[in-house]
Amino acid sequence: MKILHTADWHIGKIVNNVHMTKEQEYVLNQFVDLVSREKPDVVIIAGDIYDRSVPPVEAVELLDNVFNKILLECKTPIIAIAGNHDSGDRVGFARKILRDHGLHIAGRLKKEIEKLTLEDAFGPVNFYVIPYADPAEVREIFNQEEIKTHDEATKVIIKEINKTINLRERNIAVFHGFVVGGQAPEESTSERPLSIGGTEYITYEHFKNFHYTALGHLHGPQKSGEEHIRYAGSLLKYSFSEVKHRKGVKLVELGEKGEVTITFKSLIPRRDMRIIKGELNKLLDIEVYKDTNTEDYLHVILTDEGELIDPINKLRSVYPNILSIEREVKTTKNRSSKTSAGAGYKSKSKLTLFQDFYVNITGRKFEEEKEKVMLEVIKEVEKMEKGE
């Protein structure tokens, strides 16, 4: 059986006040082309279909168009679950009717875990679809007061599945959560925490009996503990912590005995998300940017030491899609982790104290011109203190 595993579309996402819907549409068109080309037996979407529980109209329209193309044009069934960003009730709307047309969406967790069975040349493949549910919800569904963490909640869910699972058949889990293996997972700042204090972590060992586990939540494509327990990663880069990620989907081929072959299929964005760094004049030099896509979404780090006049507009004349900008703070040999005014500071004038501070922080001389400006500032502050 051939499966395309994707997750974390976050349709309707806004990054630094920029709506990403058009970027998502561009990549989702590639995804539909991939479905048409590869002709998988099923597409799996492992949660966070939308970015918000109440998605904007254009997000709903985009998803509707994509699902129509996959289901009606490619004639490929879809198995999807709600993630922590989704509203389970909304994404699961009209699920019974849609199921007859090949769209299987699990919006809310139920005590009897939903199992979907598809057939290939070698027989049945069982898909256990587990939509996101927090520990309190699982505690109520299974009436087990001892459930406090996501790991304890998942343990109870898998135990329920194990009551009826046929280990002689091929079984796949579809799950949304923070599953960890033997090494630290690759996280992103665009992932909404499921809880605080480490209670969101779930051991990968719960999923060892499945031939493949299709995970959603973490935005970097990666395995969790074992080769057959995988995150597909997000559709696009949604924060600058993801600049090194390769975005795409997993093409999973399941053999007769449950053996798994996994291939990564890249999705290429219309505009990448990058970090550029350097002095203002160098970044504006055509030799620096001529071989790059200046339309990319950028975080700019300026390394200039002096004052800059209107750097953002100068940069946007070349790079129109700058999302954020910062000035690099350079440390010097004179700077320590703690600064002090030094001995005898009480006898020093305000100007001298500021001069000492400036030299200590920057490592540069406090010029006469700056001294004149600072004296004027000190005079104004002293007048305000006296109520003049």
Image (cartoon, helix red, strand yellow):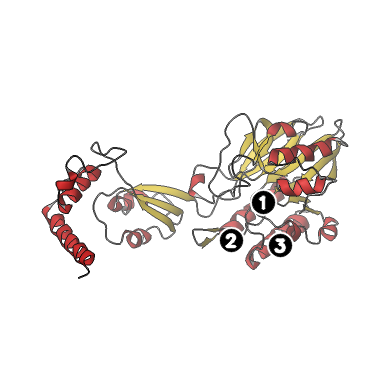
According to the picture, the residue beneath numbered tag 3 turns out to be 64
Asked if marks 3 and 1 touch (Cβ < 8 Å), the reply is: no
Q: Considering the numbered disc 2 on the image, is that residue within a helix, a strand or a loop?
A: helix
Task: Tell me the CA gap for discs 2 and 1.
Answer: 20 Å
Q: Position of residue 59 (x, y in %)?
A: 64, 63
SS at badge 3:
helix
Residue at the spot of label 1: 84
Where residue 348 sits: x, y (%)? 15, 48
Residue 370, placed above or below residue 42:
below
Q: Quadrant of residue 372?
A: bottom left
- Which residue shows up at 86% across the image and 33% down it? 169
Label 3 sits on what residue type? Asp
Q: Residues within 10 Å of mark 2 (few under 14, many from 20)?
A: some
Depth check: give the residue in front, 388 or 161.
388
The Cα–Cα distance between marks 3 and 1, rounded to whole angstroms, is 20 Å
Whichever of callouts 2 and 3 sits on the residue coming sooner in the sequence is 2
The answer to whether residue 229 is left or right of residue 183 is right
How far across and down, in percent of the image, does residue 219 sit? 59, 45
| Residue located 14% across and 47% down the image | 347
The residue at which mark 2 appears reads as 21
**Relative to 333, does residue 65 appear above or below in the rendering?**
below
Counting residues from the start of the chain, the first of labels 3 and 1 encountered is: 3
Against 116, residue 99 (above or below) is below
Label 3 environment density (alpha carbons within 10 Å; few <14, some 14–19, many ≥20):
few
- Label 2 close to label 1 by CB (< 8 Å): no
Give the position of the C terminus as an image quadrant: bottom left
